[in-house]
Image: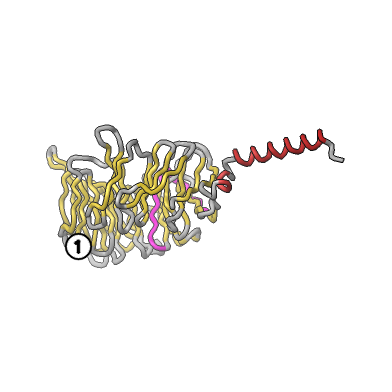
């Protein structure tokens, strides 16, 4: 014979367990067809992100954590820094302490070499062969750029005597691009310089851009994309402008030019709504998306674009078509699409979520 009081107590206990399961953020995703999976982080620590292989790298001033699509930390790197910068190219990972003196080259979590510069690092970059370029302060000059091979040996050095260094990049075959910030009375402009580290020829001026150039990135050995505060330039080796995106008096609030086929720029309209504009690598407008709100963060991979609004994440095509919406329960600080392009890592203040984006 069943004891009714005991049965009621058992049912109540089971109900409590089920309620706890359904309200647990850690496993809520299981009951939502794996829509969301929570990952706990330390509070008060900011992360930047990069794709690497099938994983996403979480980078902060303590080092690197490699996160899988399942939300598992696969490996980590300890790299203490005050202002960490990371660059991933091919199978290599470069870590730099901007305003410090330390550089490191890794393949996964395996250290290849460490480099200590003589002066503080201004900017650093790496090509797909694992060669590192570092711009630093230099006594008697406006700056200096040194290039190191995979063993950490310095193989090239260039000094800037006329302008401060705003950014650098290194092509697969050893072309070095330098953004040199110049002043002429009340005018500020940027010289885009290029040099071949395989010889000692003088730096060649590819073009001069009004205002301040923000970033230079090689698409291949002969194509260089330069983002300025007024426009984007696609330059061929020799200085010919292959394509140009004119911002028409607007200043982007954010941008992403890392993707091979899609460049995304964010602009604020008069209503303080964020407009995302998607362009091909050649500068052709593919589409735009009016968020109807402010956008906290966004990312692009292939044809997929994701953006975070207040407690909401949207997936958009490169043509600007809204494809999916996912609700979140906190303010998004950063986000990154996994290389598989079916999921994304979304980071808040003290935790993160892996969400399906298709």
Q: Position of residue 151 (x, y in %)?
A: 41, 64
Residue 142: in sight, yes or no? Answer: no
Residue at the extreme front of the image, as rendered: 1
Residue 344 seen in this snapshot: yes
Q: Position of residue 60 (x, y in %)?
A: 45, 45
> Which residue is depicted at the point 50% across and 51% down?
65
Q: Which residue is mark 1?
A: 237
Q: What scheme was used to colour the molecule?
A: secondary structure
The residue segment tinted magenta is 76-90
Given residues 32 and 303, the one toward you in this image is 32
The main secondary structure of the magenta stretch is strand
The N terminus is located in which quarter? top right
Disc 1 element: loop
Q: Is residue 131 left or right of residue 200?
A: right
Up the image or down, 111 lies above or below 327; here it is below
Location of residue 126 by image quarter? bottom left
Residues 165 and 60: in front is 60
- Report whether 331 appears left or right of 134: right
Residue 70 appears left or right of 217: right
Q: Is residue 56 left or right of residue 122?
A: right
Is the residue marked by circle 1 packed among few (<14), some (14-19), or many (20+) residues within 10 Å? some
- Is 161 a magenta residue? no
Q: Residue furthest right?
A: 1
Q: Is residue 81 magenta?
A: yes
Q: Where residue 101 sits in the image (x, y, percent)?
A: 39, 49
Residue displayed at 39% across by 61% down = 152
């Amino acid at each position: 014979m069943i004891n009714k009081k005991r049965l009621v107590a058992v049912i109540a206990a089971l109900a409590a367990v089920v309620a706890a399961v359904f309200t647990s953020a850690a496993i809520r995703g299981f009951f939502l067809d794996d829509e969301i999976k929570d990952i706990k982080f330390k509070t008060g620590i900011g992360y930047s992100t990069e794709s690497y292989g099938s994983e996403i790298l979480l980078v902060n001033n303590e080092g690197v954590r490699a996160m899988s699509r399942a939300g598992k930390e696969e490996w980590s790197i300890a790299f203490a820094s005050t202002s960490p910068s990371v660059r991933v190219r091919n199978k290599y990972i470069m870590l730099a302490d901007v305003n410090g003196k330390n550089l490191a080259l890794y393949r996964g979590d395996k250290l290849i070499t460490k480099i200590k510069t003589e002066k503080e690092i201004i900017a650093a970059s790496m090509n797909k062969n694992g060669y590192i370029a570092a711009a630093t302060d230099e006594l008697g000059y406006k700056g200096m750029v040194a290039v190191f091979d995979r063993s950490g040996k310095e193989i090239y050095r260039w000094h800037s005597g006329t302008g401060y260094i705003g950014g650098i990049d290194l092509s697969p075959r050893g072309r070095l691009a330098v953004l040199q910030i110049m002043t002429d009375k009340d005018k500020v402009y940027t010289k885009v310089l290029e040099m071949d580290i395989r010889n000692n020829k003088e730096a060649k001026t590819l073009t001069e851009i009004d205002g301040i150039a923000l970033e230079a990135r090689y698409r291949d050995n002969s194509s260089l994309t330069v983002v300025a505060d007024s426009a984007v330039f696609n330059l061929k080796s020799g200085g010919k402008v292959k394509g140009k995106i004119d911002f028409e008096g607007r200043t982007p609030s954010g941008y992403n030019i890392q993707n091979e086929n899609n460049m995304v720029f964010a602009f604020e309209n008069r209503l303080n709504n964020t407009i995302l504009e998607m362009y091909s690598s050649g500068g052709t407008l593919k589409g735009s998306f009016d968020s109807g709100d402010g956008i906290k963060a966004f990312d692009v991979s292939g044809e997929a674009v994701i953006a975070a609004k207040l407690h909401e994440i949207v997936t958009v095509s490169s043509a600007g078509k809204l494809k999916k919406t996912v609700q979140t329960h906190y303010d998004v600080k950063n986000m990154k699409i996994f290389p598989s392009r079916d999921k994304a890592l979304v980071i808040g203040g003290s935790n993160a979520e892996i969400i399906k984006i298709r």
